[in-house]
Image (cartoon, rainbow, N blue to C red):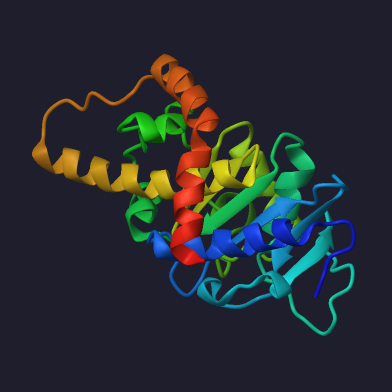
Amino acid sequence: MSVPGVEPSVLEDLAAASRILVDQGVFDQAGHTSMRHPGRAERFLMSRSLAPASTTAADIMEFDLDCNAIDPKGRSGFLERYLHGEIYKKRPDVMAIAHSHSPSVIAFGLSHTPMRAMYHNAAFLAAGVPVFDIREKFGATDIVISSPDKGAALAETLADKPVALLRAHGMVAVGPTLPVAIFRAIFTVISANIQHQTIALGGRIAALDAEEGALADVVNVQTVGRSWDLWKKRVS
């Protein structure tokens, strides 16, 4: 199933992104990725609702920013597509998004210990990692970002940052390209694991500061293609 105005290779890359995040241990049976439509900024592309390891190019659907499917062909979208649509509305610089439930990351959304950039590949975290607590605006919920107002509240918390945590839920990573968003999702999890290990060792943590993070992130964005090509090859 094609998407009008979108090259098949783009759909294949987006499908591969889900499989990459499974291969790298970021996704399990859940999680989803999306990208802004390359020719229509007011729309985005996202898989139908299914386990990410099973995603193919034929599963990719087109949505408007209110998260209505353009031509569903009998397929159902993810309940949490509003997370994606509302971020795209608020952040015109964002071209791709990944949302996962990685356990090592969830721990930082539950505690008062902030997530930090533990090494150069996680430099983007040095900008700060806000935590979205759905209770603050919506009270007791099922935690799922299943409506436009919940998605908008998350987008407000994310603000201009590359990553935000969702209390008792997971994380969202965004980027100016699909490979960068996937890179950030992967290295957020790796950095979280390193931070857990470093905390266990005790003593002062010499994480990257904001200036170091900004400088290192420029290099990471410029060289992300090397990682992306390897990851795609692994899941092809």
Q: Residue furthest bottom?
A: 74
Q: In the rendered view, does 82 fall on the left or right side of 143?
A: right
Residue nearest the viewer, comparing 174 with 225: 225
Rendered view: 154 above or below 11 = above
Q: Position of residue 193 (x, y in %)?
A: 27, 48
- Which residue sits at x=43%, y=61%? 234
Q: Where is residue 199 in the image (x, y as percent from the top left)?
A: 18, 39
Rendered view: 224 above or below 46 = above
User: Where's the N terminus, which quadrant?
Assistant: bottom right
Residue nearest the viewer, comparing 62 with 110: 62
Rendered view: 216 above or below 163 = above
- Which residue sits at x=42%, y=59%? 26
- Which residue sits at x=11%, y=29%? 203
Q: Position of residue 136 (x, y in %)?
A: 57, 49
Q: Where is residue 32 in the image (x, y as percent from the top left)?
A: 59, 63
- Which residue sits at x=37%, y=62%? 25
Res. 98 in view = yes
Residue nearest the viewer, comparing 80 with 58: 58
Q: In the rendered view, does 80 fall on the left or right side of 37?
A: left
Q: Residue furthest top?
A: 211
Residue 103 occupies quadrant: bottom left
Rendered view: 179 above or below 145 = above
Res. 150 in view = no
Q: In the rendered view, does 108 fall on the left or right side of 148?
A: left
